[in-house]
Amino acid sequence: MNRHSLLYGNDPEQSDGRCQRGQRVFCSNRGQRGGCGKTFSVFLAQVLPRHTINARLLWKVLSAWLAGASLKASHEEVRLPLALETLYHLVQRLRARLDQVRARLCRQRKAPDSPHEDPLLQTVEHLRQVFCAALCPVSEFQFVFQRPLLG
């Protein structure tokens, strides 16, 4: 494995900023090496691949929503630099992946009893319980399971 180049993307907290999102890696098949010859991306844990929003901002929104605020109020509280419709789209993507996320979380710890009827809020609560020591459970989920939360 050879590091190839850095991956950069938009920084959601700066209007014209750019931030490092990961590293390109080359699986060398030159000489006597048995690599595949392909180049692939390795993303940082705080990055949500294919999304401008980072894991920390998503966690702030989900935490505010779990605390009882509406999605719109959560969006305004966190001051997301994205449109409200984008947040609704992200929530729909997360809902579509609940089966995979919950299966991974249940391997770590049994789901807690939840007062919420919404399966997504139950999953956010479970995520908070499994990674209670982490500052950002979303990035910790991606680091531990080596899978993006939003696919």
Image (tube, helix red, strand yellow):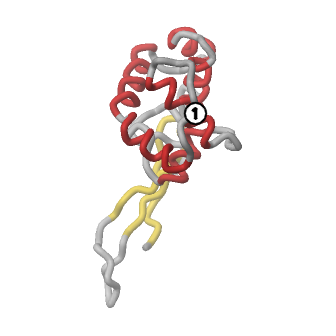
Q: Where residue 123 appears, x then y in whole percent?
A: 49, 31
How many numbered marks are there? 1
Q: Nearer the viewer, residue 49 or 115?
A: 115
Question: Taking 15 as reference, is 47 above or below it?
Answer: below
Q: Residue at x 54, y 53 (%)?
A: 144
Which residue lies under the disc numbered 1? 112
The amino acid at mark 1 is: Pro
From the viewer's perspective, is 125 left or right of 132? left
Q: Residues within 10 Å of mark 1 (few under 14, many from 20)?
A: some
Determine whether, in the image, residue 130 is placed left or right of residue 48: right
Task: Look at the image and tell me in which quarter the C terminus lies.
Answer: top left
- Quadrant the N terminus occupies: bottom left
Residue 81 vs 94, above or below: the answer is above
Q: Position of residue 27 (x, y in %)?
A: 36, 72
Q: Position of residue 67 (x, y in %)?
A: 63, 17
Give me the residue at 68% from left, 39% from top: 135
Name the residue rendered at 49%, 44% in the picture.
Answer: 106
Find residue 139 and report its image quarter.
top right
Q: Is residue 136 above or below residue 64?
A: below
Quarter of the rendering containing residue 13: top right
Q: Secondary structure at mark 1?
A: loop
Which percent across, then down, holds residue 8?
Answer: 48, 46
